Image (cartoon, rainbow, N blue to C red):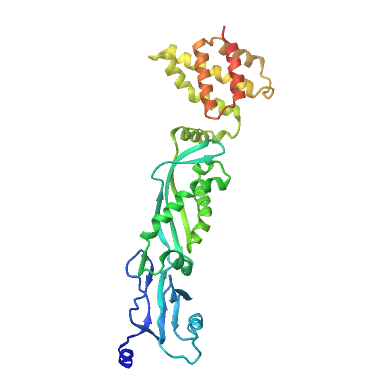
Amino acid sequence: MALMDFIKKQFIDIIQWTEEGDGTLAWRFPMRDMEIQNGGQLVVRESQMAIFVNEGQVADVFGPGTYKLTTQTLPVLTYLKNWDKLFESPFKSDVYFFSTRQQIDQKWGTPQPITIRDKDFGAVRLRAFGNYAFRIADPKLFHTEISGTRESYPVADLEGQLRGLVLQNISNAIAGSGLPFLDLAANQVMFADALTKELAPIFAKLGILIESLTVQNVSLPEELQKILDQKIGMGMVGNDMAKFMQYQTAQAIPKFAEASGGGGGIAGDAMGLGAGVALGQVLAQNLQQGLQTPVAPAAAAAAQAAAAPVGVRPEEVMATLEKLGDLKAKGILTQEEFDTKKAELLKKLV
């Protein structure tokens, strides 16, 4: 009876995986009651790796190529089975194939705004999304940590875990980069590099290599987006604070005219322009005190003549103070600068 059972057994001559369909990371070769013929062939294609598992223990790992399965090509399995060099019997082991090609266009994104800490702005709430690509780099580690003894393991079963790791480490990436958040938000490639660096060792613990990651969009709170827009708009004037304040004044003039003129007209335009000029003169004089070159008497007289008709009324001073308060709240003016400008403006009240 034992002899008949042996004769009825089927022997496997070729072990291979053709990867029918997409999205499978690991696949177990169907063994059932079959045994591997000693001297049979193992075919591992490019973008694949294979492992032999004997009684729950990984015996051998094979990269791309064609292998004749003998005691010489299975040294670890030979040791586990205590075979001697003359042993020529078929053997039975579980064989798992792994796809090592890139799994591209894996999506990640923040379903809800997340809060991060920034050295310039404190707590910042943002939303972001992008994609990434990964591949299996260590099939033995992936087998023991992720796929296990399952018949097949698809990408879909892993993508939720990987996406969660991306979202969990956004804050760590920004903090670890040491760069202000505004710099990262304005340079999405820099943001992606910082996040990839943070994720690489975490993915490696699963036997996975992260090949690339992109940040396609970063959505900021409205107030922070305004500051970023101002920073971009002032890029042409560098770090010149006087020019920056002139830029701010130019941006504020239309709002002053609209708020002061009510229904519009020459009076409203004059009041808005007067407030803007007064603010520009006050800030420029203090920021560049002792640095300006002497002006010609004719030019000084012309400047005085132009400034003389402009009277600083109480409502204009209040509007200017409100604008300065807004600049201080956004971090553009320090408390000391605000107090100085406030004192000078109050002196102009008659």
Q: In the displayed structure, would residue 181 be above or below residue 5?
A: above
Residue 93, x across and y down, in percent: 41, 79
Seen from the viewer's position, the closer of residues 107 and 248 is 107
Q: Residue furthest front?
A: 1
Seen from the viewer's position, the closer of residues 282 and 165 is 165
Residue 259, x across and y down, in percent: 43, 17
Assign the C terminus to one quadrant of the image: top right
Q: In the displayed structure, would residue 325 be above or below residue 132?
A: above
Q: Is residue 62 visible?
A: no
Residue drawn at point x = 45 percent, y = 82 percent? 67
Residue 268, x across and y down, in percent: 43, 14
Seen from the viewer's position, the closer of residues 343 and 169 is 169
Left or right: 70 as drawn, with respect to 346:
left
Give the total of numbered labels.
Answer: 0
Q: Is residue 167 visible?
A: yes
Residue 306, x across and y down, in percent: 56, 13
Residue drawn at point x = 53 percent, y = 42 percent? 183
Seen from the viewer's position, the closer of residues 253 and 84 is 84
Assign the N terminus to one quadrant of the image: bottom left
Q: Quadrant of residue 157?
A: bottom left
Q: Quadrant of residue 111?
A: top left
Q: In the displayed structure, would residue 52 be above or below residue 177?
A: below
Q: Quadrant of residue 331?
A: top right
